């Protein structure tokens, strides 16, 4: 008799904790590095208002075993196991499995070769506590079945049938086991059904939003944070929200402490994985990350994780809490960090916590990178970065601001004076559409427009190549459909623009930006023109912008990646009036000849090549230079840049053979 894991659909919450436990169990209890490697051997399925987990049944007459042409699948210790060395990736087993429990995956092994592996439940062979999914299921829906428990189950089913008792699929909480009526534990399921509604944070009044740059959302009050924390079901030790967060924040653990009113304990846990939680809590697109995985998302709405994260830090910092590094022993190593953006700051944080002396160089007068000079103040108040600069400085991190590497100091000098260098310089070359007249007066790139606006708010001098642009009284058209476009739209509205229109070539459903930001922009008075493609910028007799020649589009068939491309509608040209046009098409890496001079290789898009998966993580082709954030992955997110900065710091510690004092 083979053993196997079964799931009880009545008890299953659909929380994915079994998937996370499975992946971690097969990766030395660590999070895997890339989303592509999240390959659970048990899968939670939600369909027709039902939830359940599917995994290998270790069939007695296993069709996968019989289908394998290379003898890679065999019976071993009451289970069906795969010898990965022998797997040739033919997928016969995947076709043969009646439950869809087998998955053949490939990974590159260099020189254009790949290695195939057939992944299926191996019952966590060799794990002392048995299958991790069973151990971590929060509702007790998973059970490891042996010959005896299977006999008992069959017996219970026969008894039910004989007594015409309501069956599990009828929704009863009763079942028979070993001849006795027992109650199925439905506490978690009931808890889920009883959870109160999701609450989003309060916003400042609309009139105030249109006039100024104050932050839009308010921090939760203690009662709001308590009531929202109560909603968390704590789906397992490592839950799917934790997995979906690129920093793998210990979310259920800090939410549990908020429930108990222990904010000081919560902030300690929060800082184990994240050195800027009050910032990620504000700017992360949570609907795509932590909250996107929440078990309650399709029920009563995801737990407001980001706002609880923000609340914890704000409460603790306001009460005087600061990171305590008094137990850290200094080591005789010195690392230079180029760029005080999220990647550089996260790298510096880990190095400081391990006793390494760290100096951060940035060409701007304040730390934060795009947190300070890209993201507008109505999403992220600039005083938060000044406060963090003081906190980091108290942790021993040195900042050299207004200092551009490659101009003020050569990279060679940093390499001579330091044991390693981390590069987190972001991506700053604006993408162009290649439109006729796009260099004309009245056409602006998104980032210099936003940077100059923030500098004015901060009382900093403007630069000749980044002049302040006042949109008051203008008809502004912003080209693009991402978050940067929405930031430009809402900044123009706050200047007092006469009319602001966001023009995007796809439809609203296919906009890449956050839905929350589009909703906020609409509330503030923005107009939208979807399915329009710019052809050229129209100029008046004085050579100034007076409109954009547009062509209407319709959505075509989905491409190989499922994305629908806009198709031009013939004869639909028209002119959209405008006296200011902002181009917000995204960013490419900027040129850094000083970097290539030191043997750092770039890819075809100009991104720095860094070793993501090797033990010396995020090392470049120059062994002494490490890199991470947008400069490596291309323009992305604050939280992904921070995750890479942390990984690179661990790579640097490994390279410098510094013993770990900080385990996260
Ligand atoms: P950056 O933040 O760009 O930091 C790089 C730093 O390096 C800068 O301070 C720069 O001055 C410095 N630097 C560069 N070259 C040198 C040099 N030679 N010498 C010294 N210093 C140098 N992400 C979100 O998650 N949520 C959002 O809401 C969001 N909104 C955004 C809005 C806008 C307008 C933009 C442009 C981006 C937004 N992003 C958002 C993306 C996010 O800001 C970036 O992905 C993130 O900041 C990248 O971090 P980084 O550390 O790699 O680079
Ligand atoms: Fe969610 Fe971002 Fe916080 Fe992670 S860092 S828990 S993704 S808000």
Image (tube, rainbow, N blue to C red):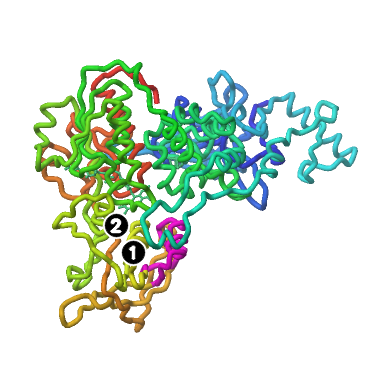
Query: Which quarter of the rendering shows the C terminus?
Result: top left
In the image, 336 versus 506, the foreground residue is 336
The local secondary structure at tag 2 comes to loop
Ligand 1 contact, mark 1 (Cβ < 8 Å): no
Whether residue 272 can be seen here: no
Stretch of the chain drawn in magenta: 502-531
Residue 521 belongs to the span the image colors magenta: yes
316 falls in the magenta region: no
x%, y% of residue 474? 29, 72
- Neighbor class of circle 1 (other Cα within 10 Å; few <14, some 14-19, many 20+) is many
Provide the residue designation for mark 2. 586
Q: Is residue 381 above or below residue 353?
A: below
Res 649 seen here: yes
Residue 278 % position (x, y): 41, 40
Residue depicted at 42% across the width and 46% down the height: 282
Image quarter for residue 13? top right
Q: Is residue 538 left or right of residue 88?
A: left
Rendering coords of residue 364 (x, y %): 20, 44
Q: Quadrant of residue 362?
A: top left
Q: Residue at x 84, y 42 (%)?
A: 166
Residue tagged 1: 480
- Which residue is outermost to the right? 163
- Quarter of the image for the N terminus: give it: top right
Please state which of residues 554 and 459 is positioned toward the viewer in this rendering: 459
> How many neighbours does mark 2 have within 10 angstroms: few (below 14), some (14-19), or many (20 or more)?
many
| Marked residue nearer the N-terminal end (1 or 2) | 1
Would you place residue 94 above or below residue 479 in this image?
above
Q: Secondary structure at mark 1?
A: loop
């Amino acid at each position: 008799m083979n053993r196997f894991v079964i799931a009880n659909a009545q008890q299953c919450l659909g929380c994915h904790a079994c998937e996370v436990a499975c992946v971690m169990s097969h990766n030395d209890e660590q999070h895997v590095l890339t989303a592509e490697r999240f390959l659970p051997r048990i899968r939670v399925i939600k369909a027709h208002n039902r939830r359940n987990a599917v995994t290998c049944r270790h069939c007695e007459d296993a069709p996968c075993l019989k289908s394998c042409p290379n003898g890679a699948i065999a019976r071993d210790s009451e289970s069906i196991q795969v010898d990965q060395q022998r797997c040739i990736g033919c997928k016969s087993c995947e076709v043969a499995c009646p439950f869809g429990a087998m998955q053949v995956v490939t990974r590159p092994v260099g020189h254009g070769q790949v290695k195939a592996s057939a992944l299926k439940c191996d019952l966590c062979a060799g794990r002392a506590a048995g299958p991790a999914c069973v151990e971590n299921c929060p509702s007790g829906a998973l059970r490891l079945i042996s010959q005896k428990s299977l006999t008992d189950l069959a017996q219970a089913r026969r008894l039910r049938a004989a007594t015409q008792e309501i069956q599990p699929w009828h929704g009863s909480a009763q079942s028979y086991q070993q001849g006795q009526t027992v109650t199925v534990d439905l506490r978690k399921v009931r808890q889920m059904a009883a959870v109160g509604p999701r609450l989003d944070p309060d916003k400042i009044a609309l009139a105030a939003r249109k006039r100024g740059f104050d932050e839009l959302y308010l921090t939760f009050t203690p009662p709001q944070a308590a009531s929202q924390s109560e909603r968390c079901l704590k789906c397992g030790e490592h839950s799917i929200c934790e997995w979906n967060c690129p920093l793998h924040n210990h979310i259920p653990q800090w939410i549990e402490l908020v429930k108990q009113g222990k904010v000081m304990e919560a902030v300690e846990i929060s800082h184990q994985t994240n050195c800027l939680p009050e910032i990620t809590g504000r700017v992360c697109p949570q609907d795509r990350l932590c909250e996107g995985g929440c078990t309650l998302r399709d029920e009563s709405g995801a737990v407001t994780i980001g706002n609880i994260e923000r609340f914890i830090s704000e409460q603790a910092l306001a009460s005087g809490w600061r990171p305590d590094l008094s137990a850290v022993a200094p080591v005789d190593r010195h690392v230079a960090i180029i760029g005080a953006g999220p990647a550089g700051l996260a790298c510096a944080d880990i190095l400081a916590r391990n006793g390494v002396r760290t100096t951060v160089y940035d060409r701007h007068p304040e730390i934060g990178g795009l947190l300070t000079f890209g993201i507008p103040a109505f999403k992220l108040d600039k005083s938060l970065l000044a406060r963090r600069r003081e906190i980091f400085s108290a942790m021993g991190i040195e900042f050299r601001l207004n200092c551009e590497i490659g101009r003020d100091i050569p990279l060679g000098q940093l390499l001579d004076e330091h044991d390693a260098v981390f590069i987190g310089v972001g991506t700053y070359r604006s993408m162009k559409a290649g439109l006729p007249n796009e260099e004309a007066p009245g056409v602006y790139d998104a980032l210099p427009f936003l940077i100059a606006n923030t500098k004015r708010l901060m009382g900093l001098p403007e630069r000749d190549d980044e002049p302040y642009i006042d949109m008051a009284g203008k008809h502004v058209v912003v080209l693009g459909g991402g978050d940067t476009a929405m930031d430009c739209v809402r900044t123009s509205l706050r200047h007092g623009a006469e009319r602001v229109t966001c023009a995007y070539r796809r439809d609203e459903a296919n906009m890449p930006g956050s839905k929350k930001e589009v909703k906020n922009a609409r509330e503030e008075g923005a107009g939208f023109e979807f399915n329009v493609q710019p052809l050229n910028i129209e100029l008046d007799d004085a050579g100034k912008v007076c409109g954009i020649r547009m062509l209407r589009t319709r959505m075509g068939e989905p491409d190989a990646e499922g994305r629908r491309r806009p198709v031009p509608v013939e004869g639909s040209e028209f002119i959209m009036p405008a006296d200011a046009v902002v181009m917000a098409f995204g960013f490419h890496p900027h040129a850094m000849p000083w970097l290539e001079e030191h043997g750092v290789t770039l890819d075809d898009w100009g991104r720095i090549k860094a070793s993501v998966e090797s033990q010396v993580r995020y090392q470049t082709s120059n062994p002494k230079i490490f890199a991470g954030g947008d400069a490596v992955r291309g323009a992305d997110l604050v939280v992904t840049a921070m995750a890479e900065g942390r990984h690179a710091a661990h790579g640097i510690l490994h390279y410098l053979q510094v013993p770990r004092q900080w385990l996260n």
